[in-house]
Image (cartoon, rainbow, N blue to C red):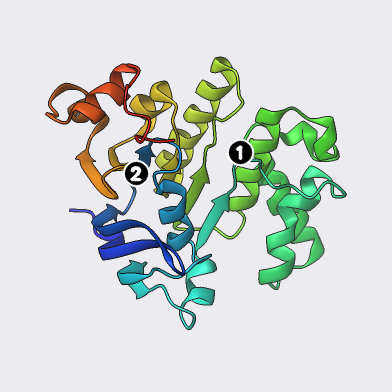
Amino acid sequence: MAEPVIELEHVSAGYPGVEILGDVSFSVNEGEIFVLLGGSGCGKSTIMRHMIGLNPVLGGTLRVLGMEMNRKNRPKILRRIGVMYQSGALFGNMTCLQNVMLPLEEFTKLGRKARVRKAQDLLGQVGLADAAGKMPAEISGGMKKRVAIARALALDPEIIFLDEPSAGLDPITSSALDDLILKIRAARGTTFVVVTHELPSIFKIADRCAMFDKARHGMIALDSPTALRDTTDDEFVKRFFSRESRDDPSHGE
């Protein structure tokens, strides 16, 4: 049985003086594609920020790769995870190759030729070998996200966090990105934690989902996407998966 690589125990999530979610407990298993769901403003991105160490939890315990996420352990954890932000967050004054090489330059002792080879290989793995010399402004939104995934893979992370990877992409490009995520997991055994609203992507890639609700100030469901769609008794979860409109504006906005 796969071991948990992320564990949350009675976590309070938010910012100093502002609790967004309370008493959140779940775990993410090794090799799993785990999706964080919910309406806008429900706290799913806040939970991710805690997982990658950008903000400390307000209460409870958060462990990543067996270590409690705190100031002491954060540098060790960061060496073992990769992050792709929603916009891709590529440096506009660097080529695609240089963007992918950056973590190798900062955190490894590889020589330049080895760094170039590895970055080129990573771009090839995401289908962008021909884009190595291009600037971010010269490539499409979907290509930028694939470059960002290549950069996130640079240090051979055990966990990759993806924030809205399909946002702003057309359905064909979004599906190709889902295929890439599945391909990386199959080849490397990488664990993925993904924030997304895209139902086709959720059903294609997710092993399990945690769903949050702003109105109830916490996690309201945890299961496979099919189970959440077909067997839940929670009306908000049903509406989310059937894309029904809701009369209560407090859910999500």
Please state if 159 lies on the left or on the right of 34 as rendered: right
Give the x, y percent position of residue 142. Answer: 65, 29
**Residue 7 falls left or right of residue 162:** left
Residue 20: which quarter of the image?
A: bottom left
The kind of secondary structure element at disc 2 is loop
Residue at which label 1 appears: 125
- Residue at position x 28%, y 62% in the image: 8
The residue sitting at 59% across, 52% down in the picture is 152
Judge the density around disc 1: few (<14), some (14-19), many (≥20) Cα neighbours within 10 Å: some
Task: Examine the rendered structure and indicate whether residue 193 appears above or below residue 225.
Answer: below
Residue 122, placed above or below residue 202:
below
- Tell me the tag on residue 7: none
Q: Residue at x 29, y 37 (%)?
A: 207
Residue 220 image point, x, y percent:
22, 43
Element type where label 1 sits in the image: helix
Choose top left, top right, bottom left or bottom right for residue 61.
bottom left
Of the pair 40 and 227, the residue shown nearer to us: 40
Task: Out of 168 and 73, give the one closest to the viewer.
Answer: 168
Q: How many marks?
A: 2
Q: Amino acid at mark 2?
A: Lys
Q: Position of residue 28 (x, y in %)?
A: 30, 53
Residue at numbered disc 2: 214
Q: Residues within 10 Å of mark 2 (few under 14, many from 20)?
A: many
Task: Tell me where residue 111 appears, x and y as whole percent.
Answer: 77, 67
> Residues under labels 1 and 2: Cα distance?
38 Å
Q: Quadrant of residue 65?
A: bottom left
Establish if 236 lies above or below 85. above
Q: Mark 2 or mark 1, which is nearer the start of the sequence? A: 1
**Badge 1 amino acid:** Gln
